[in-house]
Image: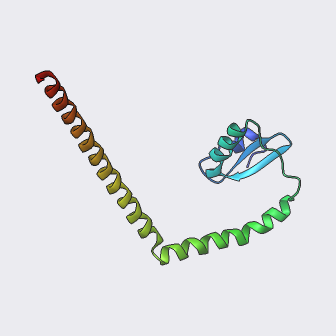
Amino acid sequence: EGEGGAEAAGAHGEGYGAVEADAGRVWVYGTDVGLVHACESYAGRKMEECKVVKEKEALRLLGPTGKAMGLSRRTLVECGFMELVKRQRERKVRERVQMGKLKKRARKAAKKAARKGAEEGVGS
């Protein structure tokens, strides 16, 4: 990987990318680069180097963290979590469609009532 920030930051799509910080370089996973940039723009300032955690300590913790994430993903797949999420999304879509139909019916009824009221007002 290159030493220049632009070279390393150019690999946002895969692997690791560098995000320039005021006090140094912060390494984040490629898929998180956009999130980091969004957080920086929301906060109105660039990320700074963390002085509390040393790089060696962070790298030592990455292995167990990765294993825990893999285990949790496998567990969720085994218990059918993704199927539950899919059903929940489908239910929400059905509810939104139904709510849209109810709103459309309410608007139609309101128009009809307004027309009927206008006709009765003219006929009086």
Q: Residue furthest top?
A: 122
Colour setting: rainbow
- Which residue shows up at 34% across the image and 55% down it? 95
Q: Residue furthest front?
A: 124
**Along the line of sight, the residue nearer the viewer: 43 or 7:** 43
The residue located at (77%, 49%) in the rendering is 26
How many numbered discs sit on the rendered protein? Answer: 0
Where's residue 49, x and y in %?
Answer: 84, 48
Which sits in the foreground, 82 or 55?
82
Q: Is residue 45 above or below residue 2?
A: above
Where's residue 48, x and y in %? 82, 45
Give the quarter of the figure containing the C terminus.
top left
Residue 97 vertical placement versus 114 (above, below): below
Query: How far from the left and from the top, in percent, is residue 43?
Result: 72, 39
Q: Quadrant of residue 121?
A: top left
Q: Is residue 72 left or right of residue 107?
A: right
Q: Residue at x 56, y 71 (%)?
A: 73
Kindly indicate the quadrant of the structure image that contains residue 85.
bottom left
**Which residue is found at the position 35% from the left and 51% from the top?**
96
The location of residue 71, given as percent across then percent down, is: 60, 75
